Amino acid sequence: MAAPQGSRAPLEFGGPLGAAALLLLLPATMFHLLLVVRSGPARLLGPPPYLPGLEELWSQQALLLWLTWLGLQAALYLLPARKVAEGQELKDKSRLCYPINGFQALVLTALLVGLGVSVGLPLRALPEILLPLAFSATLTAFIFSLFLYMKALVAPVSALAPGGNSGNPIYDFFLGRELNPRIYFFDFKYFCELRPGLIGWVLINLALLVQEAELRGSPSLAMWLVNGFQLLYVGDALWHEEAVLTTMDITHDGFGFMLAFGDLAWVPFTYSLQAQFLLYHPQPLGLPMASVICLINAIGYYVFRGANSQKNTFRKNPSDPRVAGLQTISTATGRQLLVSGWWGMVRHPNYLGDLIMALAWSLPCGMSHLLPYFYLLYFTALLVHREARDERQCLQKYGLAWHEYCRRVPYRIVPYVY
Ligand SMILES: NC(=O)C1=CN([C@@H]2O[C@H](COP(=O)(O)OP(=O)(O)OC[C@H]3O[C@@H](n4cnc5c(N)ncnc54)[C@H](OP(=O)(O)O)[C@@H]3O)[C@@H](O)[C@H]2O)C=CC1
Ligand SMILES: CC(C)CCC[C@@H](C)[C@H]1CC=C2C3=C(CC[C@@]21C)[C@@]1(C)CC[C@H](O)C[C@@H]1CC3
């Protein structure tokens, strides 16, 4: 039986009060966005057009569809993988194994959806049921987080995350108690982080594109851009799936409501906001502006991928010729920190690229509304907060060497600004 542990870990997210507020605020924000986006004024900061009754949110069909989707993604996860990767070393010195077959799941899902559509699956009907689908996803996230909380009660202490075990049930439910909850080889957190939400996001985008084509004769250029950019982002994440094993979500954070809701509901239903906006509020977009936006996305992707690949290559093999010439700082742990190349420009060049892409995803929606810029605003806040959390963890890991890195690379995300 696991005793509450980690009471010395500093409380994050505003402690129990902050966690309780976020438990309510996050789903409320998601439903607000889903309601506002289809309303005439589409005002991000105004009140929702109306408050939906339970009959509009609850649908047995939507729940069934949602569970089928989770079941399909779980089945694809269990298929033989092209590679099995080892995760980071755990407290007990062991390493867990993870199947690398996310991109395969994306391709197989595309084939299955294509097959479904060819035999009459009404993909265009998906946008009509986004509200009950989001409700089912939220309900699933709550129930699933409860299951994870209970499961952690019988997990060995060594399986618990550094945070999320304060003894306060609301805080621990929100942050997540167990680091890598699994049943046999099925790793819940790794599965949720990359599959149902990310692939669901591009499927929702595609359904919005199909419905726009039916409504207006063909998809708009703006809709093509948003679909193309976000497909590239999701395809890239699944192609480089192994990189997620070193993120703080997998190595540090427990699996609780924050990630369960974030992965299963928040990502598919709010990250598709730009495509939803374009369906209900068509925007003219000329070729010259579209070319500029494509260039911005390409620059963002170049920085994002360049930075992530440089660090991943370096962490795998510092003598790799692609990174061997870069300057480094030695740390007491035996690991080194890059201080030239992308990681010598700012301390989080990958976040900078990600933010530039976020801008490119909103620009096709024009300048008349703030709503499609929600992702950019939320994402800036998320990354600034995430950067501060990562910085704290790195300072703990690397001590003086991290101070030296900060001295040599003074800016966090945006050169000469922040
Ligand atoms: N779309 C979305 O909603 C989100 C997207 N993301 C994206 O996911 C990607 C992963 O981000 P995230 O998980 O936050 O972490 P990062 O990929 O930025 O990794 C941070 C870690 O990198 C290592 N590191 C830091 N500086 C250096 C250096 N100079 N040299 C070598 N290693 C260094 C440290 O770990 P160590 O030393 O132990 O290797 C540090 O903890 C990013 O591209 C981000 O933009 C992230 C969150 C949400
Ligand atoms: C609901 C809350 C506000 C916070 C939820 C956060 C989650 C949505 C994100 C936490 C880290 C994430 C990562 C990704 C997606 C969003 C979440 C799950 C990526 C998979 C996106 C694609 C990148 O290439 C890798 C990212 C890793 C972290």
Image: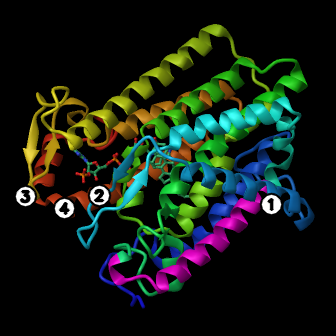
Check disc 2 and report its element: helix, strand or loop: loop
**Was residue 166 drawn as part of the magenta stretch in this picture?**
no
Query: Up-down: is 48 above or below 107?
Result: below
Q: Which mark is residue 397?
A: 4
Residue for point 55% across, 48% down:
79
Quadrant location, the N terminus = bottom left
Pick whichever, 304 or 383, lies toward us: 304
Residue for point 87% across, 40% down:
125
Instruction: Determine which residue is flagged by label 2.
Output: 88
Q: CA distance from mark 4 to mark 3?
A: 9 Å
Q: CA distance from mark 1 to mark 3?
A: 51 Å
Q: Is mark 2 within 8 Å of ligand 1?
A: yes
Kindly check if marks 4 and 1 are in contact, taking CB atoms under 8 A apart as contact.
no
Q: Does label 4 or label 1 sit earlier along the sequence?
A: 1
| Camera-nearest label, 2 or 4 | 2
Q: CA distance from mark 2 to mark 3?
A: 18 Å
- Percent of width and height locating residue 213: 83, 23
Residue range (magenta): 133-158
Q: Is mark 4 within 8 Å of ligand 1?
A: yes
